[in-house]
Image (cartoon, grey):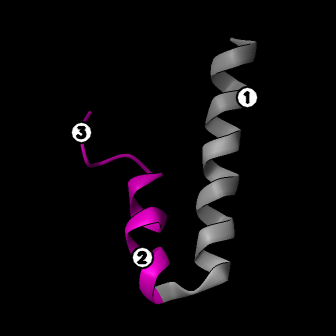
């Protein structure tokens, strides 16, 4: 796994960004999962 993925950015900033960053990271994660499942 490379560290240049869009998911690694919000997840690494979640500790200092607060709940909003966490929600953003989860949203991106779910979106990627949906693409993987439907594709």
**Image quarter for residue 13?**
bottom left
**Alpha carbons under labels 1 and 3: distance apart:** 20 Å
According to the picture, the residue beneath numbered tag 2 turns out to be 13
Q: Residues within 10 Å of mark 3 (few under 14, many from 20)?
A: few
Element on which disc 3 rests: loop
Is 23 above or below relative to 38?
below
Could you tell me which quadrant the N terminus lies in?
Answer: top left
Is 33 above or below relative to 16?
above
Looking at the picture, how far across and down is residue 30, in whole percent?
69, 42
Q: What residue lies at 47% left-to-right and 52% top-to-bottom? A: 7
Element on which disc 2 rests: helix
Element on which disc 1 rests: helix
**Image quarter for residue 21?**
bottom right
Q: What residue lies at 51% left-to-right and 86% top-to-bottom? A: 17
Who comes first in sequence, dot 2 or dot 1?
A: 2
Q: What residue lies at 73% left-to-right and 28% top-to-bottom? A: 34
According to the picture, the residue beneath numbered tag 3 turns out to be 2
According to the picture, the residue beneath numbered tag 1 turns out to be 34
**Alpha carbons under labels 2 and 1: distance apart:** 23 Å
Does residue 31 appear to the left or right of 14 in the view shown? right
Could you tell me which quadrant the C terminus lies in?
Answer: top right
Who comes first in sequence, dot 3 or dot 2?
A: 3
Who comes first in sequence, dot 1 or dot 3?
A: 3
CB atoms at circles 2 and 1 under 8 Å apart? no
Does residue 9 appear to the left or right of 1 in the view shown? right
Is 9 above or below relative to 28?
below
């Amino acid at each position: 796994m490379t560290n240049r993925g869009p998911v690694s950015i919000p997840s690494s900033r979640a500790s200092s960004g607060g709940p909003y960053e966490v929600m953003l990271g989860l949203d991106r994660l779910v979106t990627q999962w949906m693409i993987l499942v439907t594709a």
